[in-house]
């Protein structure tokens, strides 16, 4: 197994570590969760970079990389729903977009067609990661203040999180619509038309 593939598997493992840490009380657990998430996010870039640089692009790595990305992002958003930090309907929109596009990618792969990532999808991913980092940072601050966070700071953090979520939602919808438009011929074929 190549190092890039091991990094991809590490990303999946770190997702569960971060999710578990978020249910442990105390500031250090939240700091550790933020740190582990940053490491997991870095592996998203590093595994692809190393695979290209060392010419270690494998079918297993190509399969696991997008799965690891989805596990990381969806896992974090689901924990945030459980912690009542974000609304479930927003996560549902994100999850539906990811599953539908993954299904189309697998359909294309079965016909030996590679659907490359577009800039809209990359912007969407950056916005998702940024939103998660902002929420994790808010959880750290909440633990630092131990329930005594000034109301202005709480209001500002809530506003920033809400803004990040709406940007992420907008980019999710735009990138999904752009994907479907770009590959509309393939989608018609998949639907048997």
Image: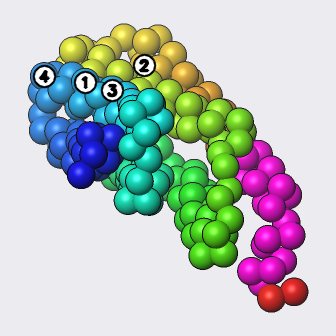
In the picture, the disc for residue 154 is 2
- Left or right: 92 as drawn, with respect to 8: right
Q: Is residue 193 in sight in this rendering?
A: yes
- Left or right: 83 as drawn, with respect to 97: left
Q: Is residue 31 within the magenta segment?
A: no
Q: Position of residue 87 (x, y in %)?
A: 51, 49
Binning the other alpha carbons within 10 Å of mark 3 as few (below 14), some (14 to 19) or many (20 upward) gives: some
Q: Nearer the viewer, mark 2 or mark 3?
A: 3
Q: Nearer the viewer, mark 4 or mark 2?
A: 4
Q: What stretch of residues is rendered in magenta?
A: 172-191
Q: Residue at x 25, y 24 (%)?
A: 35
- Left or right: 193 as drawn, with respect to 141: right
- Left or right: 78 as drawn, with respect to 188: left
Binning the other alpha carbons within 10 Å of mark 4 as few (below 14), some (14 to 19) or many (20 upward) gives: some
Between discs 1 and 4, the one toward the N terminus:
4
Q: Position of residue 189 (x, y in %)?
A: 81, 80
**Could you tell me which secondary element the residue under label 3 belongs to?**
helix
In the picture, the disc for residue 38 is 3
Q: According to the image, label 4 marks what residue?
A: 28
In the picture, the disc for residue 35 is 1
**Could you tell me which secondary element the residue under label 4 belongs to?**
helix
Q: Position of residue 14 (x, y in %)?
A: 23, 42
């Amino acid at each position: 197994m190549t190092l890039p593939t091991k990094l991809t598997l590490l990303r999946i493992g770190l997702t569960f570590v971060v999710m578990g840490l978020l249910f442990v009380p105390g500031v250090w657990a939240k700091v550790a969760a933020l740190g582990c998430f940053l490491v997991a996010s870095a592996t998203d870039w590093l595994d692809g970079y190393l695979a290209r640089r060392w010419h270690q692009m494998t079918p297993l790595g190509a399969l696991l990389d997008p799965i690891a990305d989805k596990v990381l992002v969806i896992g974090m958003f689901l924990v945030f729903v459980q912690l009542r930090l974000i609304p479930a309907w927003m996560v549902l929109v994100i999850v539906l977009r990811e599953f539908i596009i993954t299904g189309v990618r697998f359909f294309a792969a079965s016909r030996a067609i590679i659907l490359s990532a577009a800039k809209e999808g990359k912007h969407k991913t950056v916005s998702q990661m940024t939103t998660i980092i902002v929420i994790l940072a808010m959880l750290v601050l909440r633990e630092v203040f131990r329930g005594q966070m000034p109301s202005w700071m709480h209001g500002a953090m809530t506003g920033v999180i809400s803004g990040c979520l709406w940007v992420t939602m907008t980019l999710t919808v735009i990138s999904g619509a752009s994907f479907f438009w770009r590959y509309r011929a393939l989608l018609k074929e998949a639907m048997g038309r």
